[in-house]
Image (cartoon, coloured by chain):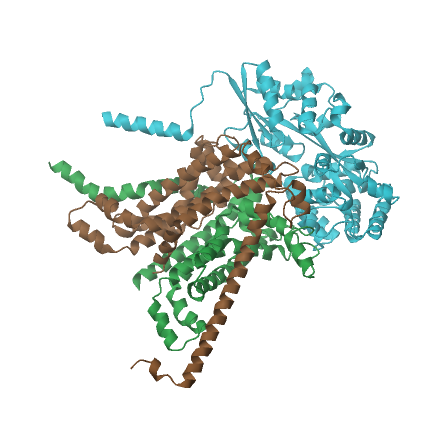
Amino acid sequence: MASTRTINRALRGPIFDYIMIGPAVVLFSVFIVWPAIQTLYTSLFAEPTKGGAFIGLGNYREMMGDPVFWIALRNNLIFILANLVLQVGLGTVLAAILDRGIRRGSTLMRTIIFAPLVIAPVAIGVMWKMILEPNFGLLRQLADGIGLPFPTQGILGDPYLAFPAIIGVGVWNYVGFMMTIMLAAMQGISKDVYEAARIDGASAVQTFISITLPGVRYALVLCGLIVIVGSFKTFELVYVLTAGGPGNATQVLGTYIVESAFLVFQPNYAAGMSVIVLLVAILFGSLQVYNRESKVKT
Amino acid sequence: MKTGICRISAAAILGTALLGPAVAQAQTQITYMDLGPERIAFNEEIVRQFEAANPDIKVNYIWQANEPYKTGIKVMLDSNSPPDVFFNWAGTTVFDFVDAGVVRDLSESETRGDGWTRDMPMSITDQFRNPEGLWGIPTRIYTKAFWKNDSFFADNGLEAPETFDELLGLCSKVREIDPQMTPIAFGASESWTINHYLTVLFQRHVDPARIAADHRLQGDAEALYTDPGYLEALKDFQEMVDADCFNAGINSVTPEVSRAMFASDLAAMTFCGSWCPPQFDEQGFEGRYSPFHFPAIEGAGGVQDGILVGASGYQISAASKYPEESMRFLSFMNEPEQQALMVEMVGQLPANGSMVPEDLLGAANTRLLQMIAESSVSSPPLNTVMETTVSDVTLKSGQDLVNGTITPEDFMQRVRDAAVKAARP
Amino acid sequence: MSAATQMTPQRETGRKKRWFGRRLRGGMAYGALILVCIAILIPIVWVVLASLKTRREVFLEPLGLPAVPQWQNYTQILETAFPANIANSVIITVGSVVPMVIFSLMAGYVLARRVFLGRRLVYVVIVLTFAIPFHSILVPLYRMVDALGLLNTFAGLILPNIAIGIPFSVMIFYSFFRDFPAELEEAARLDGCSPWRILFSVVLPLSAPVVLSVVILQTVNVWNEFLWASISTTGDEVRPWTTGIMQFQGEYSSDWPRILAVVNVVMVPLILLYLVSQKYFVRAFAGMNK
């Protein structure tokens, strides 16, 4: 029967494709794209408590003059840069040592270094606040033990030390993940290449620079991407450690948006900042489209 | 055709499985949302008692912990299904809800003389009142006092200070006696603790009517928070920091750690709320501490015998389908008998404390209620009564002041800027 | 002739030097790794110890061992809503991750392998939005879930979790299938297999490593998700552990030993999951270095 054949062909053709892509597209459009569009829309209105009138770009103008918004944006940028250097850099070095430097105990160490990734932010906040506590905390006791001075304002309460501390905790949290990806990539490099380099008398550092790094360049890009996006999206780590304090010293866009929307109840101003976040997110996305595309061509 | 029906019913089955069973509601159901977790056991008991007495009403009790409650309450009230009865701290949010039209006026219940009005002090009910009506009823109050380590004070011949200068002097005396001893344990990783100091210091330095008008953003916007007393108060606070009254790393210390320090003989004093004694006791400090008034400040222009008192209670949402039943539940919950039960099970200060027997209250609470009675003016904490954005600036700037990144002048400038902005229509 | 027989005395000492250098480097490598491991383990060990202390010890003797291990911190959390919270978390996590991975795999596969109208648009939109964080859409999302009557339901927790995880998962599957050897599918197609058949008989069996990696990553995300849960749940019936943990966190004080006990308990399933699937996890990421 002709109709069955048509159905069959359609099932093998576009219907297959649309059935396959349908659920993801529907869920994602309803729960991500639509709210994102609404965020854009509500950002053009005054706060509900102030009448909720259409004010065009009023919220954005206010944002430009809001020092806390700029602090948050700056912290986000610092976070991205620091994490790129520390998480990806340290992760790569650790992976290289695990890959080439040692023979025994590699699995155990890999597991230990990876472990913090699975710890919930709620838990990370609890443990690190206590470790950094300035009167009884672990770090204070260690400092006293070896006769080092401890910062008088503590760490998470000090406007200059709090953010570096958050970065440090982030490294502790994620370096194992980066290391795992890099290690996987390094294990894909043929042993013959290293052997050849060894016969040529190349040092470990030379081998690392001339063989390992080029061999893992795509994994490096992937790690960089994960770190950039992750650092940009950060909310929970800062929320559980300092909630943006002391004052607004460690505010990032995530915490400032949630605070404005839910605590100070300026949902439309928060929507305006969310739009900035969405725009930057889309910018990262387009870089990834570009990255993918250039990769396919080569 | 048949398969079509089959699919639809399958989807429906899946739907109900995902959404949870639709509750068949033969009786009236009211949703009651409270702060957790301290009050869970108490609330379950109250709901049980109430449902037994009112078989036609079912109470759906839900709770949120402190932080999610603060962040979520406004959104919840804004949602399609707000709780009928819900907890709130007296202050700005109460009236924000009034402005948004999402809560009910409860004046009628008060005029009718429902059960909860028995022995309820008017001054506390007033924290939920504005000229348009009564928007909530109080359940409990909280206050804040200095607590001293009795044996340390007795052993070293120290006295509770009467004046602010004596307090400063005491700080250096404690340091002389024992350099390891912190004079006043203070944890400001959560900045409301700074705000509690400032509440009392403002009260000491500025006329209460002026403070109230500033908080409500009344009058000329440019004149808001310009009273010189505010600056004096901030300078006094800074003097306490500079006089080494506190432990190291104030902003890094959680309020909880500061309580543990006091209750472990590591600090001579602490400025702590009515919620603190149970925690002192838990550290094995029972009976070894006592409260005293925040000292008077000589020559200051405000109220010298005032105290910090805040209230919290419940509101009924305007969207409630069963306002009468909700009110009945609310009133039941706040009758003196149930309040006594609350004191027993939760251990906090009841709003109508005079009805609760002293042996239930305990020594510390009894003394605190006395101290409230001795005081001429009760001020709720700044952050609860300031306009939301001004309160936010005040909270944040407190930590900056402690860290020395801003001066008292900067602090007041920020507050004034925020107030001017908030006062704009 | 082999190189060894030609070796001169000079080269002999050079080799010894290198041997010594290798030993030194090996020692340094171990040293560095062990230091890193210790730094990473200290906080974790501390949490385990602290969960066995009394509240007083947690604050005032944070370094030492618990005087008497308080095992009841663990048994007592079983008498609270904690087991129910864990059950809810399991439902939410499985209910989110399984459909998320299936849908993302399906989408990633056709995006990478097939040509159809709208392919490019869907691909670009998904990649463009993969960096969108929950907090930037929280308020409208809340209003929508509320309007659908899904607040305080598993569906209200699960659906947004699926949606937020889709873009990143799709991207990983997309990369994987791009590099998937086309010959296999081509052979099956020439044998007359339908795309369904190819998918189930050829592609899926070979996708285990990437599926497992996405499962691990997304399980960690959903299991630990806090923000959306804290905003959208008020009832005990659906509350996951991340907000349920606050039953130990009062308005003014917290039951730290018990909180830390919870923290330890919830860590275990994820670490086990990682240990079990570690091999595949590494292999999947090796595949991405192309």
Q: Is residue B340 left or right of residue B158?
A: left
Left or right for B63, reference A147: left
Residue B394 visible from this viewpoint: no
Chain seen in green: A
Pinpoint residue A227: horizontal percent, then vertical percent.
Answer: 47, 56
Q: Position of residue C20 (x, y in %)?
A: 48, 75
Q: Which residue lies furthest to the right in this view?
A: B157
Answer above or below: position of C185 versus B285: below
Q: Which residue is drawn at 63% across and 31% down?
A: B38
Task: Tell me what hue chain C is rendered in.
Answer: brown
Task: Name the one closer to the observer, B268 or C23.
Answer: C23
Residue at the image position 51 percent from the left and 41 percent from the top: C265
Residue found at the very far front of the displayed protein: C5
Q: Quadrant of the C terminus of chain B?
A: top right
B17, above or below C266, in the image: above
Looking at the image, which residue sits at the far left? A1
Residue B256 occupies quadrant: top right
Q: Which one is nearer the viewer's eye here, B99 or B25?
A: B25
Q: In which quarter of the image is the N terminus of chain B?
A: top left
| Residue at the image point whose x is 68% and y is 37% from the top | B384
**Which of the two residues, C166 or B75, is positioned nearer the viewer here?**
C166
Q: Chain B's colour?
A: cyan
C242 left or right of B145? left
- Callout count: 0
Q: Is residue A136 visible to us here?
A: yes
Q: Position of residue B35 (x, y in %)?
A: 61, 32
Relative placement, left or right, of C248 versus A17 is right
Residue B289, position in %: x, y?
A: 79, 37
